[in-house]
Amino acid sequence: MEDSYFRSLAKLRWLDIRQNQLSDERLEFVVDSITTLIDDAQERNYERWPILGEYVWPNYNWQNNSYEDEVAFFEDWFFDRLQWIDDNLPGIPLNPSAELTATSNSRIFEVKLYDNYFSRTYLKNKYFTINDAPPGIEIDTIIYVDATMANINLADAPKSNAEISVTVDAKILNTWDDLTTNTASIGTSFDENVFDEIKIFAASNSIYLHCDRSELLGNEMMIYNLSGQIVKTVKINPDYSTTINLNSPAGIYICTFKFDGKQLSKRVLITE
């Protein structure tokens, strides 16, 4: 019974905090409502297990107590505890928000959470919605960066300029509401011809990276699967070529690295 109280009251307390309507009177009303709701159930419970008013090791000594005594004891403890929390743990109000940032690569956007975090490391596409996207703009992969940041990889580069925002589903957040980002510009500013200077391909179970201007490459490359889960992080060889033995199942992988200060992503196909 007490577990049900805790879950219901904790949920209500969270909602009331958001609405600035938290009060002892409100919580007392909920306790009374739950007590009324389960009144018939508690009678059936103690008919099946006649332990009301009896001592059951190792619980508190409830000898000769009635159901009303138990409810009253719980209320006293609960409100004493809330008062202690209010006096000793004032906390800091949170204002969850999300920020969308375009990168130099027009196919990649960053979503940054503030006063919130992702509740899982596997982020499915269905939990992210692009708002006001021009035709043909679809999410290819969501890459989890850390608890407060994810990268959205588009399936294709935008063919026209537009302003978009992204809504993140509450199912993968630490709050009860969806979060919608600010708007960010998408367009055709990224030059896909940069890959003419970078050779990245796969053969058997290895990935090869070659760049004649290796001084412009970053220090490492991250390899993700299509679920956005990181498979491997490798150091880039400063001497033009890097070979990565993947030892992973056949399939499509996304290689993310920096070139000339810009974040780039390239798909490669690993075969058996």
Image (cartoon, grey):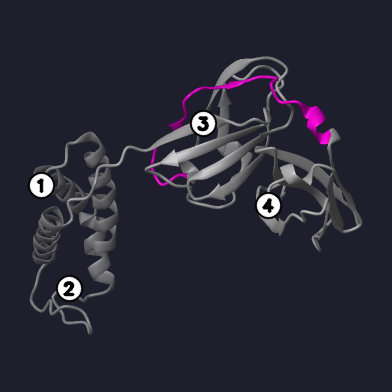
* Residue 87 % position (x, y): 10, 55
Which of disc 4 and disc 2 is earlier in sequence? 2
Q: Which mark is residue 219?
A: 4
Does residue 82 lie above or below 55 as drawn? above
Residue for badge 1:
24
Q: Nearer the viewer, mark 1 or mark 3?
A: 3
* Residue 106 % position (x, y): 67, 27
Q: Which mark is residue 52?
A: 2
From mark 1 to mark 3, how far is it between C-alphas?
40 Å
Q: Which mark is residue 92?
A: none
Instruction: Say what amino acid the circle numbered 1 marks.
Output: Asp
Which of disc 1 and disc 2 is earlier in sequence? 1
Q: Start and end of the magenta stretch? A: 173-195
Q: Nearer the viewer, mark 2 or mark 3?
A: 3
Circle 3 SS class: strand
60 displayed left or right of 11: left
Residue 165 drawn in magenta: no
Residue for badge 3:
100
From mark 2 to mark 1, how far is it between C-alphas?
28 Å
Q: Quadrant of the rendered structure where residue 97 is? A: top left
Closer to the camera, 124 or 23?
Answer: 124
Q: Nearer the viewer, mark 3 or mark 4?
A: 4
